Image: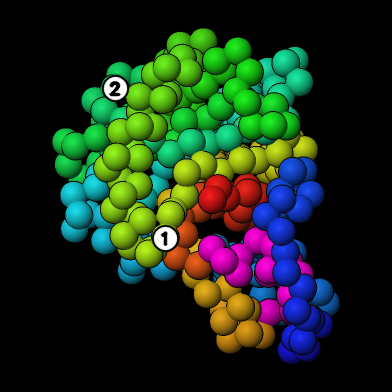
Amino acid sequence: MENLNATSQEVLDDNLSYREGPIGNKLDQLVDGVEMLPISRILAESFIDSAKNGVLPFMQNQNVNFNLGGMYAVKHLLLKDICEIMNEIKATYLTFTFVQIDPQDSRVRLTPYSRNRVIYMVASLQTQGKNTIDGNNYLIINANQDLTLKDLKISNESLKELNDFYLDNGHRVLTNYLGRSNTFYISYHIVDLIDTLSKDASDTFKINLCEISDVKKVIFENNLGDRFREDQYKKHFETHEKQMTLVFSTEKGYYDMGSLYP
């Protein structure tokens, strides 16, 4: 496999435009040429395996609760409704903020391994500048199917309370695991979201709480494609190994479109 930019000394700024617009499915952008294997599946499964062998047991040993197996879900219909609202209010990003929530909350159906507050992700509709529009925060992940988006909406104040608990508890544990600050939130551009929903009409999108693996090692060991795209690797993965991320999956494939913060 040829490395197109093996000698490149380019330093990438965190404020580059790729963080501020649609980027597509990052898992499919790392090589050029004929794919002998589905790259998105190989990389996603390596992220899932890394979590099973790394961050998930670490969190459990530190008494940080999460949904069984690190698996969550969201209905296609809810995501479609979210897109419609985003169009109406001219929101640019669907941002999932990491929080810790009461697993007994009647608005959601969670199966954590203990009674402690559980790691969860609240969806917010935001501007280009990452400001939430009119308190549009929703508990769409593992939502009670009898509830509408109106029922699942929470205030900015409620979100802050849930996020503060995460920052004081789960996030501290994750920072110890990584050795530096771990994930605060993940933002999906509306163009990427609409594109995915139009291509995949599956009833439910599974959400895998993952840990980013050594992406370059996985690609080269599996001989994925003809030419490794160093520029895409530097933009999206080089400094994020061991960081948490979310990978959406259906029977049709795996999707990792979001920008991670930090």
Type of the residue with mark 1: Arg
Residue 58 seen in render: yes
Residue 255 seen in render: no
Q: Position of residue 152 (x, y in %)?
A: 46, 17
Q: Residue 234 magenta-drawn?
A: yes
Q: Is residue 153 above or below residue 110?
A: above
Quadrant of residue 224 within the rendered picture: bottom right
Between disc 2 and disc 1, the foreground one is: 1
Type of the residue with mark 2: Asp
- The magenta stretch is 224-240
Residue ID at (37%, 64%): 179
Looking at the image, residue 103 sits to the left or right of residue 244; the answer is: left
Quadrant of residue 95 within the rendered picture: top right
Residue ID at (34%, 66%): 54
Residue ID at (18%, 49%): 63
Count of numbered tags? 2
> Circle 1 sits in a helix, a strand or a loop, which is it?
loop
Mark 2 vs mark 1, CA separation in Å: 31 Å
Residue located beneath label 2 in the image: 105
Q: Quadrant of the N terminus?
A: bottom right
Looking at the image, residue 48 sits to the left or right of residue 198; the answer is: left
> Circle 2 sits in a helix, a strand or a loop, which is it?
loop
Q: Position of residue 181 (x, y in %)?
A: 43, 54
Q: Position of residue 195 (x, y in %)?
A: 76, 41
Residue located beneath label 1 in the image: 180
Q: Is residue 258 above or below residue 237?
A: above
Residue ID at (26%, 61%): 57
Q: Position of residue 258 (x, y in %)?
A: 62, 47
Looking at the image, residue 241 sits to the left or right of residue 117; the answer is: right
